[in-house]
Image (cartoon, rainbow, N blue to C red):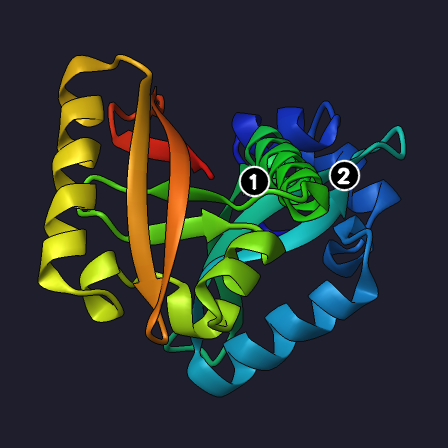
């Protein structure tokens, strides 16, 4: 290292540039050598990298996720330097992993419920549903995802469902509706429970149970 600032030293747990250089070569700061190779290959071919995620390790051996950006700098005398920065994104990665675990848990729970369950966004698109809902609609998961009632059902039936959705989204009250649906010429009579969910971003969703 030719130069590092105080924040870089604190991030890796060193007191000075001299201590850092005595203990580590730049490549030694990577906890995963695959990430080191990825960064080296990209910066050699493109002369710069932007926001590449890599696993690093501190002086005490503790590992953390960092986001690295760097450019290749050549001086008139021919010397070459990598000038860049690293941002600690460990908390962000942990949050992402927790969200993925929660999503996977919810998906698995929904899949095991025998009754059809679905989640619609404010534009009436199905964004989540279980296998029983696919069976009920006689469509594949790929066919249904991000589609609406109007893609498969009559205007009369779709209008009725959308009105019920809008009432739930507006009031927040739990709605118990007797409905009918026509699938491949066969009429099914339903009892549908719909409720509203609002996420941290203020987006509204309809959760339905048939």
Front in this rendered view, residue 95 or 138: 138
Q: Earlier in the sequence, mark 2 or mark 1?
A: 1
Q: What percent of the width, then of the height, locates residue 13?
A: 75, 26
> Against 26, is 89 above or below?
above
Q: Position of residue 59 (x, y in %)?
A: 84, 32
The residue sitting at 82% across, 51% down in the picture is 31
Q: 127 or 104: nearer the eye?
A: 127
Name which residue lies at 59% across and 31% down.
95
Q: Nearer the viewer, residue 101 or 25?
A: 101
Residue depicted at x 51% and y 74%: 79
Asked which quadrant contains residue 4, the reply is top right
| Residue under pointer 1 | 4
Can residue 71 be seen here? no
Q: Disc number at residue 21?
A: none
Numbered disc total: 2
Residue at image point 22% right, 47% down: 124
* Res 14 → quadrant: top right
Q: Are marks 2 and 1 in contact (CB under 8 Å)?
A: yes
- Category of crowding for the residue at label 2, using alpha-carbon neighbours closer than 10 angstroms: few (below 14), some (14–19), many (at least 20): some
Q: Which residue is the site of mark 2?
A: 20
Query: Between marks 2 and 1, how big is the CA–CA gap?
Result: 9 Å
Q: Is residue 205 left or right of residue 74?
A: left
Question: Looking at the picture, does residue 109 appear above or below residue 7?
Answer: below
Give the structural element (helix, strand or loop) at label 1. Answer: loop
């Amino acid at each position: 290292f030719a130069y590092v600032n105080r924040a870089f030293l604190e991030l890796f747990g060193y007191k000075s540039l001299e201590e850092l250089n005595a203990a580590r070569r730049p490549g030694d700061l990577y906890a995963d050598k695959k990430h080191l190779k990825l960064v080296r290959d990209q910066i050699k071919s493109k002369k710069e990298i932007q926001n590449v995620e890599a696993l690093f390790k501190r002086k005490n051996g503790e590992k953390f996720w960092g986001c690295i950006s760097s450019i290749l700098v050549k001086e008139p005398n021919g010397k070459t330097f990598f000038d860049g920065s690293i941002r600690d994104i460990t908390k962000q990665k942990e949050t992402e992993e927790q969200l993925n675990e929660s999503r996977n848990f919810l998906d698995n729970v929904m899949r095991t419920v025998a009754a059809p369950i679905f989640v619609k966004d404010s534009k009436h698109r199905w964004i989540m549903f279980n296998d029983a809902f696919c069976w009920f609609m006689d469509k594949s998961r790929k066919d249904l995802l991000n589609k609406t009632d109007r893609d498969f059902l009559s205007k009369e039936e779709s209008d009725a469902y959308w009105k019920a959705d809008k009432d739930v989204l507006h009031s927040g009250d739990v709605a118990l509706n007797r409905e009918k649906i026509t699938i491949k010429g066969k009429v099914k009579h339903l009892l549908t429970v719909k409720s509203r969910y609002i996420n941290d971003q203020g987006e509204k969703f309809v959760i339905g149970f048939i």
